[in-house]
Image: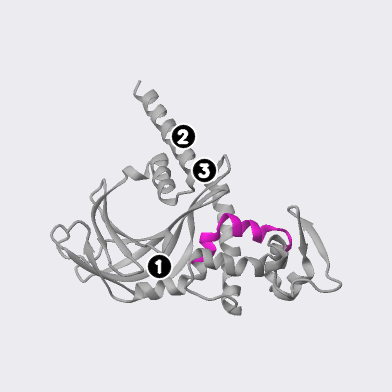
């Protein structure tokens, strides 16, 4: 009877999640539902939450697992697609970053992964049960090591295990390449919100899928060659003129557009990473929530 009740509860949670997601595409509700479905919401309990009062609001959560081991998660309000995880600070305040947890939705579903990272930070959290203030800063650059866990939800299909890992590792490589190139040509301004970022870059990267009025002047020249892929006539001559060699086939096949549509938040996060680390490198004072 217990198993049947548990199965019914899981089914109800899934139905509620699906309904909310398709109506609102709400990241916070989706994240909560995803945690409920995979059980991760029950693996840790929150000990304390600290928040900054700055425009780029920072939040540090101290958690404890069933073995009484503590850890910290760091998140920025402006970049809700990811959280940084780290070990619990030593008495000196230093701690090690361990992973970046990414979860973001699109109209097609969502991508979720754990990216192993390396780096050092400093958090002052002395006598956590009584402490009302905290400070935080990155003291050593964060380096990405690779994706170790991945899940994909595409329409009504849920992809996990090695298939999800292979898919998102390939996407990781493509997104790394496209964002490094975007930053190198300095076409778009940095420190934009995600809507302005998309509005600025989409016509340049994919003029074929925007209105004629929004296309760059140089996108179509006499004698240009087109190739149909994913039901879109790609201007391969434009690709050759504008994109680096390693992105030519990715764009002409429609794969780059699919990455953009399914993982815009991921692309935005990598593009903005320098600004993110700059924010986190400044010493930030936080106040314990509820104090």
Look at the image and give the residue range highlighted in magenta.
252-269
Is residue 268 left or right of 142 when viewed as pictured?
right
Q: Earlier in the sequence, mark 2 or mark 3?
A: 2
**What residue did someone put label 3 on?**
22
Q: Pointer 2 and pointer 3: residues touching (CB < 8 Å)?
A: no
Image vertical order of residue 108 relative to residue 256, above or below? above
Q: Secondary structure at mark 2?
A: helix
Q: Nearer the viewer, mark 2 or mark 3?
A: 3
**Which residue is drawn at the image coordinates 42% and 71% (left, top)?**
276
Residue annotated with mark 2: 15
Image height of 2 relative to 102, above or below: above
**For residue 179, what is the image quadrant?**
bottom right
| Residue 31 highlighted magenta (yes or no) | no
x and y, in percent, of residue 288 in the image: 21, 61
Q: Which residue is mark 1?
A: 118
Q: Residues within 10 Å of mark 3 (few under 14, many from 20)?
A: few
Q: Contact (CB < 8 A) between labels 1 and 2?
A: no
Q: Residue furthest front?
A: 213
Q: Position of residue 194 (x, y in %)?
A: 50, 64
């Amino acid at each position: 009877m217990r198993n049947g009740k548990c199965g019914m509860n899981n089914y109800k949670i899934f139905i509620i999640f699906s309904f909310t997601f398709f109506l609102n595409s709400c990241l916070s509700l989706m994240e909560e539902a995803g945690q409920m479905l995979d059980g991760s919401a029950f693996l840790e309990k929150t000990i304390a939450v600290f928040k900054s009062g700055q425009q780029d609001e920072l939040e540090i959560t101290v958690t404890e697992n069933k073995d009484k081991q503590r850890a910290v998660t760091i998140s920025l309000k402006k970049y809700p697609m990811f959280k940084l995880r780290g070990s619990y600070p030593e008495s000196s305040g230093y701690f090690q970053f361990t992973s970046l947890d990414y979860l973001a939705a699109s109209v097609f579903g969502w991508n979720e992964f754990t990216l192993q990272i390396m780096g050092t930070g400093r958090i002052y959290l002395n006598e956590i049960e009584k402490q009302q203030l905290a400070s935080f800063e990155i003291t050593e650059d964060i380096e990405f090591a690779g994706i170790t866990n991945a899940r994909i939800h595409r329409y009504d299909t849920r992809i996990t295990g090695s298939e999800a890992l292979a898919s998102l590792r390939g996407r990781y490589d493509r997104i790394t390449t496209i964002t490094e190139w975007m930053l190198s040509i300095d076409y778009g301004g940095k420190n934009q919100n995600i809507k302005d970022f998309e509005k600025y870059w989409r016509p340049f990267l994919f003029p074929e899928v925007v209105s004629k009025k929004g296309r760059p002047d140089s996108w179509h020249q006499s004698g240009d060659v087109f190739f149909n892929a994913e039901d879109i006539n790609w201007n391969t001559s434009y690709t050759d003129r504008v994109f680096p060699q390693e992105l030519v086939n990715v764009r002409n096949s429609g794969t780059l557009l699919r990455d953009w549509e399914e993982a815009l938040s991921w692309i935005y996060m990598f593009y903005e990473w320098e600004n993110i680390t700059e924010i986190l490198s400044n010493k930030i004072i936080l106040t314990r929530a509820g104090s």
